Each structure stands twice: as C-alpha cells, then as structure tokens.
Image: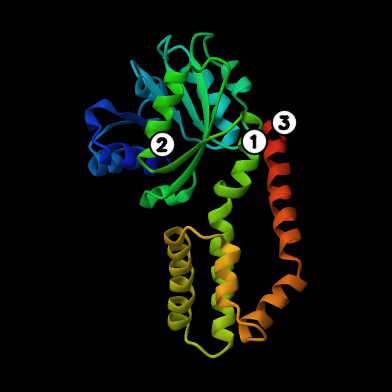
C-alpha cells in the first residue's frame, strides 16, 4: 500500500527529491530507489532509518502493520517537526493512541485506502484526530486523490469503512474465484472460465459506473421474468446473501476493535 501511495504521489507531479522512506532490508531500499528515484533508509544498515526518513518532513505516512504503528511513532517522535502531519494507514489504531505517542503539536489523521490504489482506483477513507486543521485535512485529501477517490468520515466510522472498501477487494476476488470454479465445473477450461468471469465482473462494474443507475435497476434489466437469470437469483436470495454480507462485515469490524484494544 505504501508503494501504491508513493507511485500516486510521483505520478501527480511531486518531485522524487521531496520524498524519503524507510524499510527493513537494504535490498528493498535499493529496489525502491531504483524504481522511484527516492531516498530510502534501511534498518538493516541504519538503526535510525525511521528517524532519518522523517527528518524535516511536512507530512509523514506510517504504512506499517497495525501492531507496529504506535511503536514506530514513538521511535520517530523526536525527529518529527513540531508542525508535522502524521497519516496512518492501518486498521484499528485510533488517533488518540497515535496522538499520545507524539508531541502535542503534531497532528494525526487516519487513512484507510484499499489495494486498487495500485491502479489508481482506490477508495480511501479519512478521519481526522483532535489536532488536525482543515488545511491539513485538505492536504491529506489531495494526497490520497492521487490514487483514487476520497471519503471523509468521522473516526467512529473508519473501522466500519475498512470492512467495506478496505476489505472489499478481497470479497470481490473471492467471489470471482468461486464463480470461476463454477464455470470450470460446467466444462470450461481454466483460462476460458477466468476470461468469462473476470470480464463479466469488469464489464458489469463499468456499466454500473457509466449508467448512473442503481444496481437493482440494472439487475432487473438482465433478469427476464421466468428466465434463467431469475432462477439463479432466486438461489442467491434463498441463501440470504444480505445476512452473509452483514455477518462478514460484522466479523471484520469486531476484529478491528480487537486490534484497537491491543488483542
């Protein structure tokens, strides 16, 4: 995700000389420098890699696993500018927890992008902490608009957002995976099954976006009375997909709350 954001920033016109990063291995640092032209510090060769990366930075993006967010912020707190803006990319870690790890003048914002950021089609949720100004939130919005669409929400909704757009691509990939298996079971080759399913999903999504219509309206256009599609949709309805979606997102939200509680 960090690399997707980095690619978006550079494609928006920001000069590579204005960006620095840190990573664990020297090999990764070298690859990122070669690929993006930015300065990268590696923990493998520099114990103060995080601190070196954020020195003099106006905006600091912390794109690590949730369990390490507060640890990283504590590590770099002495290197942060007094007026720095810190943006996390992690589920479950509250702005209150992050603010407690840095100086009182440092502003904090939570972000929750998703993996389509890699192709510039992310949906990113943003929630500001108690210290972030309107200007800083505007900066964060502009930053994440380089990789897709941005939705500003209250922090109380950011974990719920993560269960929809954050985890959502995995749900879509899972449905495509299962639909492809069903096509193979009907006698199509794996390559033909993949082509049929993936292009059907892609085409349907583009049609939905271009039409401006509700999904239900487009579904009804495809579903002729007493036809084959209606028979298939009836099976989905009998399985109570609405409840399955509700249960799945509730399970993801419960896990986000466990992470926030340190479990």
Task: Find residue 115 and report its horizontal and vertical position in percent.
Answer: 46, 49
Residue at 56% x, 57% y: name it: 170
Q: Earlier in the sequence, mark 1 or mark 3?
A: 1
Name the residue located 61 percent from the left edge and 81 percent from the top edge. Answer: 229
The residue depicted at 65 percent of the width and 83 percent of the height is 225
41 and 202: which one is in front? 202
Image disc number at residue 157:
1
Residue at figure coordinates x 36%, y 19% from the top left: 58
Q: Earlier in the sequence, mark 1 or mark 2?
A: 2
Q: From the top left corner, tell me how far across and down residue 86 is, in percent.
A: 47, 23
Of circles 1 and 3, the one toward us is 1
Left or right of residue 209: residue 41: left
Which residue in the structure is indicated by mark 2? 144
Q: Is residue 211 above or below residue 34?
A: below
Q: Secondary structure at mark 3?
A: loop
Q: Residues within 10 Å of mark 3 (few under 14, many from 20)?
A: few
Which residue position is annotated with label 3?
261
On screen, 234 above or below 137? below
């Amino acid at each position: 995700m960090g690399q997707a954001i980095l690619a978006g920033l550079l494609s928006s016109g920001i000069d590579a000389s204005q960006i620095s990063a840190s990573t664990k291995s020297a090999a990764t640092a070298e690859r990122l420098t070669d690929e993006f032209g930015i300065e990268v510090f590696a923990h493998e060769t520099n114990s103060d890699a995080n601190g070196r990366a954020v020195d003099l930075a106006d905006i600091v993006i912390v794109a690590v696993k949730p369990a390490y967010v507060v640890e990283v912020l504590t590590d770099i707190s002495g290197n942060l500018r007094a007026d720095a803006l810190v943006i996390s990319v992690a589920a479950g870690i509250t702005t209150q927890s992050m603010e407690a790890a840095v100086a009182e003048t440092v502003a904090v914002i939570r972000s929750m992008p998703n993996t389509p950021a890699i192709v510039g089609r992310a949906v990113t949720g943003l929630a500001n902490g108690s210290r972030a100004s309107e200007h800083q939130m505007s900066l964060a919005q502009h930053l994440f608009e380089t990789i897709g669409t941005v939705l500003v929400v209250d922090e109380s909704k950011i974990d719920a957002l993560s269960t929809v757009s954050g985890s959502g691509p995995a749900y879509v990939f899972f449905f495509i995976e299962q639909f492809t298996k069903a096509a193979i079971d009907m006698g199509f080759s794996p390559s033909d099954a993949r082509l049929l399913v993936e292009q059907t999903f892609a085409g349907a999504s583009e049609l939905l976006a271009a039409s401006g219509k509700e999904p239900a309206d487009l579904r009804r256009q495809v579903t002729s009375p007493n036809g084959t599609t209606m028979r298939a949709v009836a099976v989905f309805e009998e399985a109570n997909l609405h409840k399955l979606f509700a249960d799945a997102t509730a399970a993801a939200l419960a896990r986000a709350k466990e992470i926030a509680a340190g479990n």
